[in-house]
Structures are given as structure tokens and as C-alpha cells.
Image: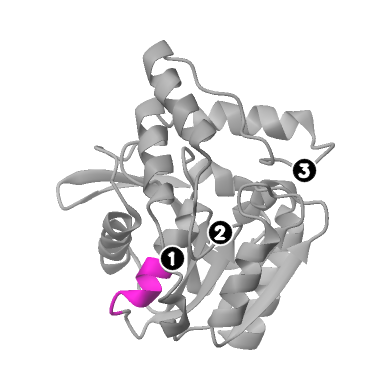
Amino acid sequence: MVETRQIDGRAVTFRRERGTGPALVCIHGSADNHHTYDRLLDALPDRARYAINLPGRAGTDGPPLRNAAEMEAFLSRFIETEIEGDYAVAGHSLGGAVAIEHALAAPSERLKGLVLLATGARLRVHPMILQLFERAAESGELPPPAPGLYEQGVDPDLVDEASKARELTPIETGGADWRAADSFDRMQDVKDIQVPALIIAGTEDALTPPKYAEYLAAHIAENEVHVFEGAGHMLIMERAADVSEAIEVFYQCHI
């Protein structure tokens, strides 16, 4: 179910599904919105779960935020307002940066874990992607998917589904997201994360390759790592069933 709330004078839109706790709060990546989690949320039928839209897209008022720290502040206010009891935060790509920020920013005792999906302690963005969004802002046409976004042989219907969903994210917001990702660097700080982390990567992800997951695993004290053979950056869509299974096991063992 998609809902909208007023939080600090801003309309915030999110998908909410009821179930058992602790709740899983999901944050999308650059140029995306809550729809990127549709398949994963559908695969977690008994888990209380949310997929929120960061500002500037899909029913959440703008303007878009400039960096992961600002996004974390937005996430914290959402949690304070909407989430009762314990919870975990899942973040894909840029959303993973926001999840890391949340774990480092005077976290509540209610935070019980992180699910870090195709992300890293630092997110360097290829200049080509930044240039594509600059040109797209001038032309008004969405840029094509970045190389390595999907696994080889991906279902064309999945790509079409994702492309249509991204139309709910304005080009200017997408560009701001990629710049925010490019500025993120917590390589010296992730060692201070005190909650368990599930770290998931794909071998064919050119944006956040497996070495990013390896770094997180080497520096977060309590963690579990899954590297899916052949998966691309959008593994939360391509491998929704596998990711769902990994999350359920992680909940049972660590949360």
C-alpha cells in the first residue's frame, strides 16, 4: 500500500506493508524511487516493511537533498514519525550510504541491523554518468541505463518495468542523487558501526563491484556477506527471491 504523510511540512510518500517486526525500512539508490523495492517487498510477505521516497520524486516533495547526511536526517525524521518499536534499515547503492550514515549518527537503541545492498563505504561515480545527467537535464530525456546496472540476459520486461518507474524521478533529482553518491566517503568510519550488517553484492556489478562488499565486511565487526554470481547492480530486482531469503536468515540469526 502506498501512503502519504506530512512530515515537517513536507509530503512524504512511501510503500508500507504490514507484518511482523522488527520493521525493515528500505531506501532506494540514485535516480530511483520506492518502486525499485517492489519485487523484494513482495517476496517478504510476513515482514513489516517500508520503502520510502527520498525528497524530490514519486510523491515526496522536493527539493532533492545534497548529500547522504541530509538524506539520513530525512530518514531519521521518518523513523521517528512512522516506525514503532525496533527496526532495521536496508539501503541499495546510494541508499546504502544513507543506511551507513544512520548507523553512525547517534543511532537509536531501536536500530537492530543494516542490510547493505550493492553499496560501499565510498561511492565514486564515473564522470560519464554525471555528464549523462547534465546533458539529460538540457534535453529533457532520461539517459539510458548505466553499464553494469543489470546482469547479462536480464528479462527485458524487468528493464522496462524499472525504466517506467524511473520516470517518477525527475532528471534534476537523479543528477543530484548521483552527485550526492559521488561525495560519499565513510571509509575511515565504518569500523564504528555497532549493529550487525548483511552485505550483498553481485559479481557483475560494475558500479559497486564485490571489492566494495569485501571492504565493508573487513571493517564492520558483525556481518554476513553474500556475493551472487552473475548478478548486476539491480540485484534487488533481478534476484529478489534470493535477497529475500538472505534477509530472512539474517533476521533469524542476528536481529
Read off the magenta span.
100-106
Dot 1 and dot 2 residues touching (CB under 8 Å): yes
Q: Tell me if residue 102 is in the magenta stretch.
A: yes
Dot 1 alpha-carbon crowd within 10 angstroms: few under 14, some 14 to 19, many 20 or more: many
Type of amino acid at the residue the image marks with label 2: Thr
Of label 3 and label 2, which has the lower sequence position? 2
Type of amino acid at the residue the image marks with label 3: Glu
- The quadrant holding residue 149 is top right
For residue 99, which numbered disc appears in the image? 1
Percent across and percent down for residue 138 are 38, 15
For residue 151, which numbered disc appears in the image? 3
| Quadrant where the C terminus is found in the figure | bottom right
Q: Would you say the magenta stretch is mainly helix, strand or loop? A: helix
Type of amino acid at the residue the image marks with label 1: Ala
Q: Residue 19: tell me if it is visible.
A: no
Which residue is most to the top?
Answer: 139
Percent across and percent down for residue 104 are 36, 76
Q: Which residue is mark 2?
A: 119
Point 31% across, 40% down: residue: 60
